[in-house]
Image: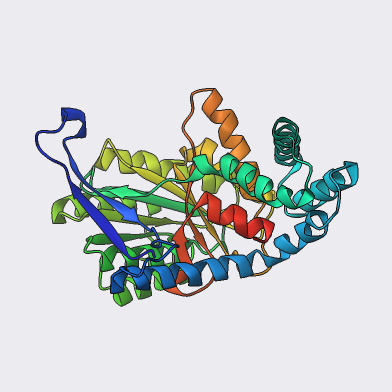
């Protein structure tokens, strides 16, 4: 589960480029094929893994049902492809990603000589997994002290709540966290983050009606002075069309760099899984403004379709071809509980999407 940081101290005799100590946010959920020799901890991880997968499948049940009819057809023909196209589009996959998946599926069926429609589901899962796999990435802290994480998102996406959950997991793993309440436009956001700070017993830099960039600067400076492992900065919720707020976001990043020229080390965008293709629009706009490194996808809990991650993956594929880095999906959320925020796993997600 999203339960601990794996601290890795590498052998000092290893090559210089590997000679560093850092922590990876390990959200692995144990071995899904338990052995009789499993320890109690392994068994607990397996149980947690199964519970998480059940929640993820339940959250994407609506999308999985969309594939059910197509995958029950008795022959591989144009009707099957049309049904799959309809299911993919209905899942908010988008036209380009839908065509990419169908083209890959047809090619695989041809080259492998597949004639049994029952094999289509596994092929589809594998193709989606391959497309989504580059989005997998673990959040690493410890390469910088502190690791400065700037978090953005539109109002209502679950940004501040996600920060609170991440903070809790970090704290439970022995990682020291300092929060920055840089969402000074909305009093409720500041109060919400103060509640999370109190609940998680972590320090917070908060100034009522202060300049967001100034709060961020103070937080990074305080994080360095106090020797904190992580500084998490909550910024104001904004729409990508709100030019003045997007400029404020850029300013926050510039000011953070005055406190630490290497920061921010991560720029995360929290997106609501229910927003469909609009999520891709948000990713593009925020990335253009502040160069995103990762995403947190929330609210995959029953009404979300989830297919937009395939569109985001295809967008990333085009970026990689031009030498640009992948904007990863670090975490996905399926509910309000702490354990409902987990590391993104491409294969698990593809299975849930197709209804496996």
Q: Residue 175 at x, y = what percent?
A: 23, 60
Q: Residue at x 69, y 49 (%)?
A: 277
Residues 212 and 162: in front is 162
Q: Residue 333 at x, y = what percent?
A: 52, 64
Q: Which residue is drawn at 50% across and 39% down?
A: 134
> Splitting the image into 4 quarters, where does residue 155 fall?
bottom right
Q: Residue at x 26, y 55 (%)?
A: 6
**Residue 245 visible within the image:** yes
Q: Is residue 42 above or below residue 100?
A: below
Residues 87 and 194: in front is 87
- Quarter that holds the C terminus: bottom right
Total numbered labels placed on residues in the image: 0
Residues 94 and 104: in front is 104
Q: Residue 174 at x, y = what percent?
A: 21, 64
- Quarter that holds the N terminus: bottom left
What colour scheme has been applied to the protein in the rendered image? Answer: rainbow
Residue farthest to the right, as pictured: 79
Residues 5 and 169: in front is 5
Q: Is residue 271 left or right of residue 151?
A: right
Q: Residue 257 at x, y = what percent?
A: 31, 39
Q: Is residue 327 left or right of residue 102?
A: left
Q: Is residue 261 left or right of residue 133?
A: left
Q: Residue at x 74, y 41 (%)?
A: 98
């Amino acid at each position: 589960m999203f339960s601990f940081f794996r601290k890795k101290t590498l052998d000092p005799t290893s090559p210089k480029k590997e000679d560093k100590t850092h922590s990876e946010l390990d959200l692995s959920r144990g071995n899904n094929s338990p052995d009789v020799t499993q320890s109690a901890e392994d068994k607990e991880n397996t149980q947690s893994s199964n519970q998480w997968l059940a929640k993820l499948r339940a959250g994407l049940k609506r999308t999985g049902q969309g594939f059910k009819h197509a995958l029950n057809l008795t022959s591989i023909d144009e009707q099957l492809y049309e049904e799959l196209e309809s299911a993919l589009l209905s899942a908010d996959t988008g036209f380009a990603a839908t065509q990419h998946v169908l083209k890959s599926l047809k090619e695989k069926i041809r080259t492998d000589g597949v004639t049994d429609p029952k094999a289509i589901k596994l092929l589809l899962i594998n193709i989606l997994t391959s497309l989504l796999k580059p989005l997998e990435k673990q959040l690493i802290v410890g390469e910088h002290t502190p690791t400065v994480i700037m978090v953005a998102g539109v109002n209502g996406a679950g940004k501040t709540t996600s920060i609170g959950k991440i903070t809790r997991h970090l704290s439970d793993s022995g990682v020291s966290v300092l929060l920055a309440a840089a969402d000074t436009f909305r009093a409720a956001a500041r109060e919400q983050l103060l509640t999370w700070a109190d609940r998680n017993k972590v320090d917070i830099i908060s100034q009522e009606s202060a300049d967001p960039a100034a709060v961020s600067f103070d937080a990074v400076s305080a994080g360095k002075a106090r020797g904190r492992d992580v500084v998490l900065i909550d910024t104001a919720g904004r729409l990508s069309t709100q030019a003045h707020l997007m400029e404020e976001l850029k300013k926050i990043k510039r000011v953070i760099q005055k406190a630490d020229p290497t920061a921010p080390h991560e720029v995360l965008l929290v997106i609501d899984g229910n927003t469909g293709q609009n999520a891709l629009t948000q990713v593009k706009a925020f990335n253009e403004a502040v160069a995103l490194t990762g995403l947190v996808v929330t609210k995959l809990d029953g009404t979300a379709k989830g297919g937009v991650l395939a569109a985001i993956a295809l967008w990333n594929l085009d970026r990689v071809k031009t030498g640009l880095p992948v904007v990863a999906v670090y975490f996905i959320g399926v509910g309000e509980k702490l354990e409902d925020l987990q590391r993104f796993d491409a294969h698990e997600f593809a299975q849930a999407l197709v209804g496996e």
